[in-house]
Image (tube, helix red, strand yellow):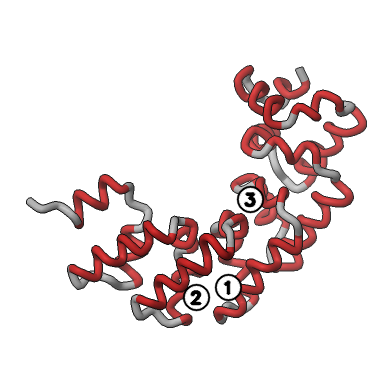
């Protein structure tokens, strides 16, 4: 009932309980309500809290004092204000399931590429999902694929800062699209930004059609 009072329907409640059955053993008054209050104190609405919990139910199992507050402080120390921290948590609640050490390794990688603090903060605020990407399976292979196509690290920084979701794609997809664009003499920073978000069907129709 408490989950429904937050604005969830029956299917959403079921998803939360299947993903995190431990929630059933938590006290509504002592454990669950204080967590929701913490989110609301950040400026997150009831509807957004419900959406956040459906997307990442395990957040309900995290401690306010030892997990949620330290994560929020980490984002603030990165340069995000309360409203941006709230937006990050709503759009990508799974960042709360990562350790601070894990998040910090992504920030270090961005800085090692040449990003300054302000660019890192703006990039994270724009696309927090970047922090949930694997360094070894996503970010580093994608960066290497771009380098092999002649992109300098300064251009990688420009792409990451301007269109970070480019690095949320699979390295194989990025390489394939660069190959297609390069074969037609169309491979530029701008063309990557404009095409990486296209579905496979739309990309193929536009650039791989044999007609």
Above or below, 172 relative to 48: below
Q: Residue at x 60, y 20 (%)?
A: 11
Question: Is 168 displayed left or right of 64 in the figure?
Answer: left
Above or below, 109 relative to 3: below
In the image shown, does 2 or 84 lie closer to the viewer?
2
The reply to whether discs 2 and 1 touch (Cβ–Cβ < 8 Å) is yes
Crowd band around label 3 with a 10 angstrom C-alpha radius: few (<14), some (14–19), many (20+):
some
In the image shown, does 33 or 184 lie closer to the viewer?
184
Q: Earlier in the sequence, mark 2 or mark 1?
A: 1
Mark 3: secondary structure: helix
Q: Residue at x 45, y 63 (%)?
A: 163
Q: Position of residue 84 (x, y in %)?
A: 65, 56
Q: Earlier in the sequence, mark 3 or mark 2?
A: 3
Q: Which mark is residue 87?
A: 3
Question: Is 40 displayed left or right of 112 in the figure?
Answer: right
Can I make out residue 28 in this image?
A: no
Q: Which mark is residue 149?
A: none
Residue ranking furthest to the right? 30
Give the CA separation, mark 3 to mark 2.
23 Å
The reply to whether discs 3 and 1 touch (Cβ–Cβ < 8 Å) is no
Give the CA separation, mark 3 to mark 1.
17 Å
Of tags 2 and 1, the one toward the viewer is 2
Above or below, 152 relative to 39: below
Residue of label 1: 119
Of tags 3 and 2, the one toward the viewer is 2
Residue of label 2: 157
Crowd band around label 2 with a 10 angstrom C-alpha radius: few (<14), some (14–19), many (20+):
many
């Amino acid at each position: 009932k408490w989950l429904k009072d937050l604005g969830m329907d029956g299917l959403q409640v079921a998803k939360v309980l299947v993903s995190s059955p431990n929630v059933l053993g938590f006290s509504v008054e002592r454990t669950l309500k204080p967590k929701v209050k913490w989110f609301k104190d950040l400026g997150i609405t009831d509807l957004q809290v419900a959406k956040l919990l459906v997307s990442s139910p395990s957040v309900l199992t995290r401690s306010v004092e030892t997990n949620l507050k330290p994560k929020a402080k980490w984002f603030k120390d990165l340069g995000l204000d309360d409203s941006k921290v709230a937006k990050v948590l709503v759009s990508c609640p799974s960042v709360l399931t990562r350790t601070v050490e894990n998040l910090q390794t992504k920030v270090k990688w961005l800085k090692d590429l040449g990003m300054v603090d302000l660019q890192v903060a703006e990039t994270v605020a724009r696309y927090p999902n970047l922090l949930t990407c694997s360094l070894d399976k996503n970010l580093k292979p994608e960066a290497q694929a771009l380098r092999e196509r002649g992109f300098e690290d300064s251009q990688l920084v420009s792409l990451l800062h301007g269109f970070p979701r480019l690095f949320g794609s699979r390295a194989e997809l990025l390489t394939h699209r660069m190959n297609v664009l390069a074969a037609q003499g169309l491979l530029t920073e701008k063309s990557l930004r404009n095409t990486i978000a296209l579905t496979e069907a739309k990309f193929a129709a536009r650039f791989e059609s044999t007609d």
